[in-house]
Image (cartoon, rainbow, N blue to C red):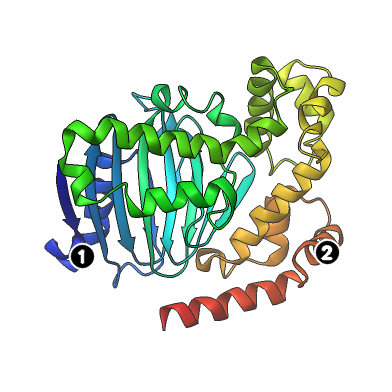
Amino acid sequence: MDEIISTHAHAPAQRVAAWNEAACTHLALMDICPFDSETFSGRMRRAELASIRAIDISCRGARVHRSAAHVARISEAIFLLDLQLQGESVVKQGGREARLRPGDFVLTDSTRPHQVVFDAPVSMRLLRIPASTLQRFVGCPEEVAGLRIDGSAGNGRIASRFLRDSWLSRQAATLQDGAPHVERAALELVASACAQFREARSERSSLGIVHRLQAIEYIEGSLEKSGLSPASISAALRITPRYLHRLFNGDGETVGRYILRRRLEQCADQLNDALHERRHVSDIAFGCGFSTLSHFCRTFRDRYGLSPGDFREAARQKRLENWG
């Protein structure tokens, strides 16, 4: 089956709503907010191979948000594989941030919230994979969700080239007898590309993985609380502080540094967002859990090389260039 879906079939005022409906129907529940609703346009090409749905998407700049409310309504656990074809995008899930350039790809877990942001027009290939199918090839896919897989080197390059050159070809999409073989080959290559991350975490038990994900989700939902700390997290999850620190040891980042990094990233997101352009820098900082403006400004400059004000101005200029 090969189907084309385009916003050009709709009146300009209806295009954003139509695009959201198509994305929710063919991929997963989500909200898509274009940076410029008046000029937004998009095109999808859908194909089915065995148990996986493949969709090619081309559209103008937007922010994609899959919230906890969307997650609560899922009827089937799936993973989305996002392969960047043209342009650049940023995919965020579970405190991880994958900056994708053409050829790179990332997995996201439908049972947890995630975001995708692209300022300029992009093209990407999305594979909607049932969790039960992916788990036959990648033992703990939730462990690699949100991690960028480099499409220019090693096994990532091999997998990326196969997904770009073979996956959605009309021949593969129409030869149903060969579809399961194409699907299996694709998943085996994806698994080989993911192995670099899984091997680095092979000492973790399945229970440890679950506890770490629970800790991350708790932190993500509490970043705005200035009192967030390893002690408060441990108490909320009913685990010891020592065990909590052990859950993060494999990533080379302490719990405290994880919290600081995520707060800084949230502030950067809002400083980069036209919707927050009129908010004072201090309001953004305090809203993301910082207790003093001086600490925020110092740590922000250390991470991004610019003051918050200069960072906001650079982001504004970039938006004007992209929209011009």
Q: Which residue position holds label 2?
A: 302
Quarter of the figure with residue 144:
top right
Q: Which residue position holds label 1?
A: 13
Q: What's the mark number on residue 110?
A: none
Query: Which residue is at the front of the view, 50 or 6?
Result: 50
What amino acid type is highlighted by mark number 2? Asp
List x then y, in percent, for residue 132.
41, 21
Quarter of the rendering occupied by the C terminus: bottom left
List x then y, in percent, for residue 205.
69, 17
Is 56 situated above or below 190?
below
Is 91 situated above or below 319?
above
> Residue visible at 23% across and 34% down?
178
Q: Could you tell me if residue 276 is visible in this image? A: yes
> Residue visible at 64% across and 28% down?
213
Quarter of the figure with residue 145:
top right
Q: Secondary structure at mark 1?
A: helix
> Residue visible at 70% across and 48% down?
262
